[in-house]
Amino acid sequence: MGGLERVIQTIVLGIDPRRYAAEVWCLARGGVIAEELLGAGVPVKTLGLTSYYNPARVGDLARVFERERFDIVHTHGYFAGTFARLALMLARGPAVVHHLHTTDLNFKARNRRIESLLSLCSDRVICVSRAVSQFAMESLGVHPRKIEVVYNTAFADSGQRAAPREEGQDILSRLSPGDFVILSVASLTRNKGHDVLLLAMRELALRHGSVKSILVGEGPERRFLESRISELGLGGCVLLAGMRQNILPFLERADVLVLCTVAREGLSVALIEGAAAGLPLVGSDLGGIPEVVEHEANGFLFRPGGSRELAHALERLIAAPGMRRCMGQRSRILYDNRFSRQVMIGRIERMYDDVLQGRANAI
């Protein structure tokens, strides 16, 4: 359950039901979001396809597409996008929209060639940031005229999460009223750079006894981070909250939201959540992060991996409540103008209309 899945949910529940009848197909398996969509009355189909290496399954999927007679197929993620678009090359019916969510610099040459080929049979390639669109053109060979930049939106205030606000009290009750709270919302993977935040926290803890950090998320790095927290003597000021369905209580208690990504970041949903909550933001200067964090306007950017730069930025915020308020206000204005739900859904609907009109004109 991450940003990609929430984007799908937001599109399906947000587009005008009088004009679009949406279904969600899970190529391999379902999950939390699939269950939430089913609960909201959205048809969800799980296909159970887990390997590229059986060409017959591509043909099977092509026949299903022909039978269902969709007008648009909108794919997300590399595996699903590859499998579905190969099938659609055989089906020759629906308009094809592919959604790129990241600047994945670990793509092998073969993956890049496949993505470049499949973009030729895609009517549009949606990129979640300008950084991703640059990556799509330069590294994947996607033609500029096929690219549409559509920013993600926040999900915490969408009304889609039914978890009670009391959910976070097991962690929040461990804070004192005067604590300065640094919030991180990210999967516990090496790419998200949590160790950078821990090193910055070690510096801050020496000078500011009331600084606390909450890490919301789960992942394979949890045991390593638990060990690092102990090793750095941060047991009293860094709290691991695990995976949470409802992050609103954490956003409401935080003084700043931080993202320490060290390698790739298409567009951080967590930072957009922070902007929607009116928080100052601090993030690594890479990928799509500078499109959410405007340096010294609504927050600070720092060199990826630069724990001392991060500590310095946080110290400036700790020392200046007035600056925090101004930056938080700028974050909310940026959210309303660039990342709001209305902006995102409006752009998706206009793109769908343009694609269908282009198909109609070509007949």
Image (spheres, rainbow, N blue to C red):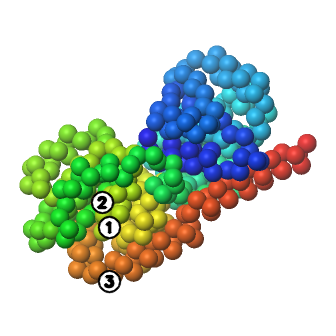
Identify whether 3 is placed above or below 206. above
Q: Quadrant of the N terminus?
A: top left
Residue shown at the point (56%, 31%) measured from the top left = 26
Q: Secondary structure at mark 1?
A: strand
Observer-nearest residue: 143 or 154?
154
Q: Which numbered marker is on residue 91?
A: none
Observer-nearest residue: 79 or 339?
339
Q: Secondary structure at mark 3?
A: helix
Q: Earlier in the sequence, mark 3 or mark 1?
A: 1
How crowded is the residue under tag 1: few (<14 C-alpha within 10 Å), some, or many (20+)? many
Please provide percent x and percent y for residue 355.
77, 49
Identify whether 158 is placed above or below 179. above
Under mark 1, the amino acid is Val
How crowded is the residue under tag 3: few (<14 C-alpha within 10 Å), some, or many (20+)? few
Does residue 101 appear to the left or right of 84 in the view shown?
left
Q: CA distance from mark 2 to mark 1?
A: 6 Å
Identify whether 296 is placed above or below 45. below
What residue is shown with label 3? Answer: 322
Q: CB atoms at circles 3 and 1 under 8 Å apart?
A: no
Under mark 2, the amino acid is Leu
What residue is shown with label 1? Answer: 256
Q: CA distance from mark 2 to mark 3?
A: 19 Å
Please provide percent x and percent y for residue 238.
18, 55
Observer-nearest residue: 191 or 282?
282
Q: CB atoms at circles 2 and 1 under 8 Å apart?
A: yes
| Residue 89 appearing in the image | yes
Under mark 3, the amino acid is Gly
| Residue 263 appearing in the image | no
What residue is shown with label 2? Answer: 183
Q: CA distance from mark 3 to mark 1?
A: 13 Å
Q: Quadrant of the C terminus?
A: top right
